[in-house]
Image (spheres, rainbow, N blue to C red):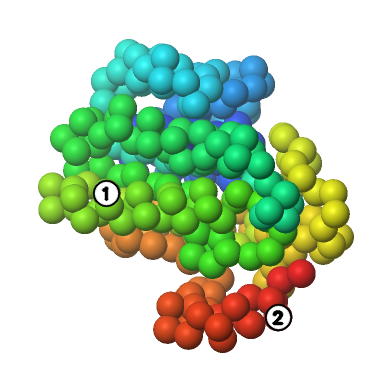
Amino acid sequence: MSLYWKDKKVLITGGSSGLGRNIAETFYLAGSEVCIVALEDNVHAVAQEIGGNVLPVQANITKQDDVEKIREAVEQRFGTLDVLVNSAGRSMRGKVLDTTPEQFQSLFELNVLGTVRCTRTFAPMLLKNKGHIVNIGSLAAKSAARFVGAYPATKFAVAAYSQQLRLEHGAEGLHVLLVCPGPIERENERLYPLEGIEGIPDEARQAGGGVKVKKIKPDYLAKQILKYCEQRKPELVVPAKARLLFAVLQLFPSLGDYLVKRNTP
């Protein structure tokens, strides 16, 4: 693995489980100094499992006071930051008209505003170091689907925010990578049960809302994220063929909708 990541200081939100943990492990094995953040108190045990010097912080990124606590911990241990991975987030299911404003607000608080809070807090360090921001989106950041409630709206917002950061700060040396994966293989159950699964097709309750693509191995995706960061690329879409659908959706929306319906419940 590249020596580029040796001794880099890396912060991963949602780093105690799922893709966030795989990303943390991959950075650690590449020689980086890693801090993982999670809401659950098992973050300390997970940090020990990844590596003895991984910094664990239990915090809620929907609260600015907690984000400041993360910043203080990073400054005290690392003194600076080279990479911020905004991985904390959750999905949901449900018909869009059955999804309440309160459910939209709750999901936006974590998936979007949590990303905004962490990014703004650590931006001075990242700009100084010409560092990296990795925002975990989804295929749903580029194409909506049926029966996933507020989820696509939040991921579209993450995609737009990532582009704005690139446009406004790319010339200053800040690299922003938007990661848009399909459904990811899971070894364990979700930390938080899916909301709003009543009244929708059984297929839509599956990973990725039942989209008809092969599940992605999280270790592979984590390694691709490091590779794309080192190459300072703007987007990582897995599977890559999904880009064809996204292009069709922009040029021919009706045809794009037809294709989405063909490949989702």
Q: For residue 250, what is the image quadrant?
A: bottom left
* Residues marked 1 and 2 touching at CB (< 8 Å): no
Foreground tag (1 vs 2): 2
- Residue picked out by circle 1: 165
59 shown above or below 247: above
Q: Does residue 12 appear left or right of residue 231 in this picture?
A: right
Residue lying furthest left: 172
Q: Distance between the residues labelled 1 and 2?
A: 34 Å
Residue for point 35% across, 14% down: 72
Q: Which quarter of the rendering shows the C terminus?
A: bottom right
* Mark 2 nearby-residue class (10 Å; few <14, some 14–19, many ≥20): few
* Mark 1 nearby-residue class (10 Å; few <14, some 14–19, many ≥20): some
Q: Disc 1 or 2, which lies upstream in sequence?
A: 1
How many labels were placed on the picture? 2
Residue 161 seen anywhere in this rendered image of the structure: yes
Q: Does residue 65 appear left or right of residue 81 in this picture?
A: right
Measured as percent of width and height from the top left, residue 167 is found at: 21, 56
> The residue under label 1 is which amino acid type?
Leu
Q: Which of 56 and 106 is in front in this view?
A: 106
Q: Does residue 58 appear left or right of residue 132 in this picture?
A: right
- Secondary structure beneath disc 2? helix
Residue for point 33% across, 61% down: 234
Measured as percent of width and height from the top left, residue 202 is found at: 86, 60
- Secondary structure beneath disc 1? helix
> The residue under label 2 is which amino acid type?
Arg
Measured as percent of width and height from the top left, residue 59 is found at: 52, 19
143 shown above or below 187: below
- Residue picked out by circle 2: 262
Q: Nearer the viewer, residue 39 or 204?
A: 204
